[in-house]
Image (tube, rainbow, N blue to C red):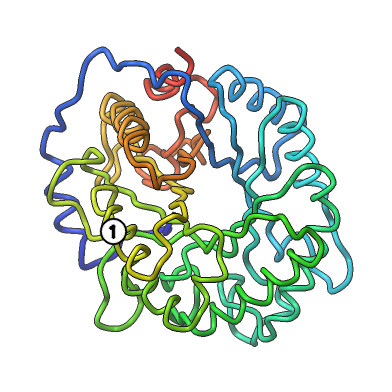
Amino acid sequence: MTHRIRGWGLLLLLLFSLLPLSCASPVRAVGTADIGMSVRMGGTDPATVARQFDLMAQMKVKWVRTDFDWSWIEQNRGQFDWGYPDLIVKEASARGMKVLALLTYTPAWAREPNTTSHAPPADAAQFAAFAAAAAERYARRGVRHWEIWNEPNAREFWEPKPDADRYGELFGAAAAAVRKVDPDATLLTGGLTRGGDAPDGSLVSQTTYLERLYGNGTAQQADAVAVHPYSFPFLPMQPNQEIGGFRGLPEVHDLMSRHGDGDKKIWITEFGAPTGTGPAAVSEDAQAEAIVQAREQVQGWSWAGPLFYFELRDGGDDRGDLHQNFGVLHRDLRPKLSGEALLD
């Protein structure tokens, strides 16, 4: 998730957040269709991690997506701390869940000076070496699906601004490294977030960016395209969404078809809506209705891959902070209405 609301869209989001969202009451259950969940459990004690996995099992979650964060795992070159992904893979495997590993973010030693972990590495080969190490460790444990970077079409996650050619170098190096270890691995592009083309280049729309990835040969190397088509404060198929929202996904598939990739799947590796009191937050009823509607719509798109909800648990207790309130569970693990819909 892009961790701020872009200024040019803030006023519209504030206005639209005041409009009522029509949603069924009581919220209907999601049903038995395969469900994916994005989780962030770093710094959480093992017992609480296990409890969260138990709740996901009750929700019939089949996929778990989490960061395999290079900037944390290899903070010092050549010294790896696999504790967090080890725990996630263990708990997922014990419950028959598949893992989508998000390979992303750069440690200080591997990036240019005066940059953050959201800048790409100075040398794509170093990222590829990390990807190979991860595949060596986890392919034999059942991790066969890899998403390469997070939201590379937005400045927030690709500093100083999106660069499809440089991302292509990163993807190509990482994909080759993973496939050398596991030839049957599934490689996804980094999930592309919503929004139109920004005049200053700080954001590139999904379709513009993907067109560039086809132009430089990157998209052809991927097994699937990943997107983050957030629609909040609207429901998934309501009109007037920001460019790149859920309703616009057929445009992404049309672009892929024009390039001969119509048989490839579009994986929705993040989708959700924040509750709370922040700008563009929605009610618990609307959040629950959004996740149900998204699942129903995806089942009608033959080209859609798995749908991952963002996210399992609220990131904090500040109801005014948009980014702390995407969970289908409250911070204390009590289910919101969306969680209840998943548990039914």
Image point (66%, 37%), residue name: 98
Q: Would residue 192 be found to the left or right of residue 149 on screen? A: left
52 in relation to 117, above or below = above
- Residue 126 occupies quadrant: bottom right
When asked about the image quadrant of residue 289, the answer is top left
Could you say whether the residue bearing mark 1 is in a helix, strand or loop? loop
Taking the image as shown, residue 105 lies to the left or right of residue 38, namely: right
x and y percentages locating residue 160 in the rendered image: 47, 82
Q: Position of residue 30 (x, y in %)?
A: 39, 21
Residue that appears at 55% across and 65% down = 222
Q: In this orientation, does residue 311 appear?
A: yes
The location of residue 156, given as percent across then percent down, is: 45, 69
- Local crowd size for mark 1, using a 10 Å CA cut-off: few (<14), some (14–19), many (≥20): many
Is residue 276 visible in this depiction of the protein? no
Q: Whole-percent x and y of residue 22?
A: 14, 28
Pointer 1 residue? 244
Where on the picture, by quarter, is residue 182? bottom right
Vertical placement of 232 versus 245: above or below?
Answer: above
Q: Relative to 239, is 92 above or below?
A: above
Q: Residue at x 81, y 44 (%)?
A: 86
Three-letter amino acid code at the position of disc 1: Gly
Residue for point 51% across, 29% down: 34
Observer-nearest of 114 and 193:
193
Depicted 19 relative to depicted 68: above or below: above
